[in-house]
Amino acid sequence: MTEAAGPRVYPARKRVVHSNPARDLAADLNPQQAAAATHGDGPLLIIAGAGTGKTRTLVYRVAHLLDCGVRPERILLLTFTRRASQEMLSRAERLVGSTSRKVHGGTFHATAHRLLRRYGLAAGLAKDFTIMDQGDSADLMRLSRSQLGYATRSKRFPKKETLQYVYSRHINTGITIEDIVRDEYAQFVDYLEDFGKVFADYTDRKQQRNLVDYDDLLLFWALMLEASPELAAKISGMYDHLLVDEYQDTNVLQARILRGMCRTHANITVVGDDAQSIYSFRGANFRNILGFPKQFAGATIVTLEQNYRSTPQILEVTNTMISRATERFTKNLWTERAGGETPWLVAAQDEHQQTRFVVDRILELHEESIPLSEIAVLFRAGYMSADLEIELTNRKIPFEKWGGLKFLEAAHVKDVLAFLRILENPRDEVSWYRILLLLPGIGDATARSAIEAMASAAWESAAFGRYQPPPRARAAHTALVALLDGLRDDPNADQAKVTADIARVRTLYDSILRERYDRAEPRLSDLDQLQTIAAGYPDRAAFLSALALEPPQATQDLAGASRDDDDCLILSTAHSAKGKEWDAVFVIWAVDGWFPSARCLDNDEDTDEERRLMYVAMTRARNYLSVTYPLNAYSTRRGANYSIDQLSRFIDRGVRDRMERVALGSEQAVRPVEAPAVSPLLDLRALLRGKFG
DNA sequence: TTTTGAAGTCTCTCC
DNA sequence: GACTTCAAAA
């Protein structure tokens, strides 16, 4: 419904396709890029460093394929995030015109979803299945857990998120449950068998309730390709060329899918950079990209090393930092760009001073006519921008925050969606349970018995109306039955149907919400927003699926700027910033224990991934880069009994020496001064071991 | 037996 | 601040 308003990196250019079949690639691309773009058939691996024109190359490759007569709808372009997919397709459109609109593209999950809607019936999947997000999966896990009686065990049983994580990791990586538990949850080894039982029940439950989780989307895709020759032929036969972006972030399951899609041809192009692999928590393994030539024999390898994005000073800093990684396979980036400012390393006294520095500096840059949309502030985790958001709001600077799917994860939004979901899929146990618990007089036991009653009535839609609730739940039951009946024969079958449904749900829900929360207003306005979003979808099913797979990418800009004013500052997690670039980038909270996150310091692999994440953050900058670290971070952290106030270990001496050091005094002057004394890095690992056992 | 309120625990990244 | 656990109230 919306198009990501990104910086226009390359000028729009229109070309008439048919009159100019032989694009002048040499003029637009360097020799390596051109080699990749014009590669013929067969597997191709492009190792592309940060800012080396990876997207550009991929877009030109699409153009090249179209020029060669490949039909656009027979090209599948797989990307990692929805933002990347949109960016790629709109750039392709600018290059080759509207033909490229027919190219199939999207995330692995969204593509799997499309295929399952189309071929799911043949694979034994009921047509109206509901997609569960991660939170829903965990909720279902909890139902399985308590159904099996684990909730009342004396010794602590893994919580639902842990169960969900272990399960998901097993599906995505193929590592056995036993190994995962032993390696990562040694305290639960006694429950090894129980993990299996819960997962078996969870799997059954999903099937009976017609629910599909994120992992299933990929798994079913792989299984359709591997277990049924007819389906495999149909599905893999849909495409002649596959292009995969961010290949370093794919996992074993996705590699299986790609192999299955290449049964009859090997026209697969993958692009990636092992130095930017930051999704191992999702089962990705950057070694996958190095294994590509083994999986696809005869692969051509092209390496892109010329950086077009950053100043030499920025490049020198980032190259130095990534060179410290213990495992490293490729390339050193270079640039022809000249001139530029040395990146700043800024020590602030505390969080608030860091905030003021960033805001002041942003305003200065803005004065120098850099648009706000060309400036980004990056951080390790979503909550780290809280203070900055308050300050920006106070100073009326419009901003947009990326990352953190807060909106859809908010309890009240999920509540309202649950009503829509049971209408769409009456068997959706997770949503029923959620709704029932909202009602006064209904708790765990009553909810269970109601669900039980509906299950034995084969989930027939009137079953809930016939259920006899205990006396104290009677009023709530009647109200809910009336609401659901009203929603079912809603005569309003026009465009605004979903919005109207939500409005109807809110006649019941708003009062519940007001009672549950002290400050209901912001939550009510979230629901208003949900109604607005819903207006963009033709029907309930499309709305629900889209929300699961393509959540709104930014939480509402809190500064309250008008919607059409799109010049606003970007705040983003480092993860969500991948693939983007800005004129000026601020990396905040470069404090050991924060970035890198303290929980990722237990082993070298995780620490290396954190380093790559820092690398991703810093390489987003074109001309201006500033890294800030507040001292005395502990003083702003509630309840923490330890002090982490050291500069991030990734900014070591060699990196520091390539930066301009700035110390903010108490008078908050913004000026370069003598290098501040940076005390030696702590052995944080030993420190934390002592504190947390 | 079931619900509800209070105290206690941990707080990342994303499809 | 959100979720879990535990004990008191209905």
Image: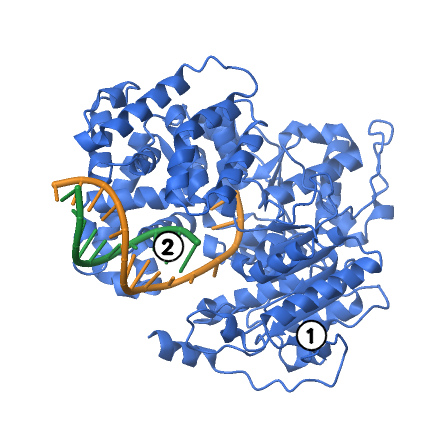
Chain colours: A blue, B orange, C green
Q: Quadrant of residue A139?
A: top left
Front-most of residues A84 and A143: A143
Q: Is residue A561 above or below residue A679?
A: above
Tell me, for residue A345, which label it has, or none.
Answer: 1
Q: Is residue A282 above or below residue A65?
A: below
Q: Give me the chain letter of mark 2.
A: A
- Residue A305 shows in this picture: no
Residue drawn at point x = 37 percent, y = 41 percent: A515
- Please state if A473 lies on the left or on the right of A665 as rendered: left
Q: Say which quarter of the image contains residue A320.
A: bottom right
Position above or below: A530 against A376 = above
Q: Position of residue A651 (x, y in %)?
A: 62, 75
Q: Are marks 2 and 1 in contact (CB under 8 Å)?
A: no
Please report the residue visible at 34 percent of the width from the left and 25 percent of the height from the top.
A426
Give the image location of residue A142, x and y in percent: 29, 46
* N-terminal label among 2 and 1: 2
Look at mark 2 in the image and give the residue it sits on: A175
Q: Residue at x 53, y 31 (%)?
A: A531
